[in-house]
Image (cartoon, rainbow, N blue to C red):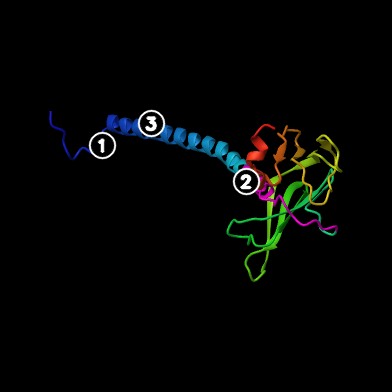
Amino acid sequence: MRRNPHKGISQLEVLVALAVMGMIAVLLANALSFSRRQLERTLPLSAEAEYFMARDTLRRWAEGMPLKREPSPATPALHGTQSEVTFETLIHDGQFWGGVPTTVTLYMEEKQLVAKASGVASKQLEPMIRSLVLSPNAKNLSFSYYGRNNNEPNPAWYPSWESGSLLPVLIKIEWEQQGGQPVPPLTLRPAHYDLNRSISLSDVIPK
């Protein structure tokens, strides 16, 4: 049976159109809800990734410390307490010029664990400062140092460190989040690059 084109839209056609539009609305709502949940999961991960990258950068700064350095009573290679540590390193990252040492300080600033690097950007000795936020909302910051300090025969953990050109083997950084979430300790290995390069046959051949 042919439909009269002058009769307009039937009630059945209206109901079918409304049903299809309702199904489309439900599908769109589900898709938007899924996208919102995915975004809520992704945003915290993106923020955490920024802090993980900052900690990795700090590890490289510590590992780039020169192993051999002329001792200077005024500026020790590393000075560490339980609440703050300062060391000199060589940074070659396109921002700092590695021809002169860069001073790195780790400390708490407005409830944030911060690493601040102060050096130069080029041979013209243009000042360069870069700050890294290692953890937000931090508390109970504590540093400890492992190595042979003050000519002790055996390495041990110390609450502070200042031995001229002698560097600790490890620096352990511990803190807590303000909300009480556990945070794994961050471990630095000073002069790790130079230590790897300085291994010689005399170090590995039994005597």
| Residue under pointer 1 | 9
Query: Closer to the N terminus: mark 1 or mark 2?
Result: 1
Nearest to viewer (mark 2 / mark 3) = 2
Nearest to viewer (mark 3 / mark 1) = 3
Label 1 to label 2, Cα distance in Å? 85 Å
User: Residue, x 53% and y 39% (percent of image)?
Assistant: 39
158 left or right of 9?
right
Is residue 53 on the magenta stretch?
A: yes
Q: Which residues are magenta?
A: 50-73
Image coordinates for residue 157, horizontal then vertical, percent: 82, 36
User: In the picture shown, does residue 110 fall above or below 40?
Assistant: below
Q: Nearer the viewer, residue 79 or 141?
A: 79
Label 3 to label 1, Cα distance in Å? 21 Å
| Residue under pointer 2 | 197
Identify the amino acid type marked 3.
Answer: Met
Nearest to viewer (mark 1 / mark 2) = 2
SS under mark 2: helix
Q: Quadrant of residue 49?
A: top right
User: Residue, x 45% and y 35% (percent of image)?
Assistant: 31
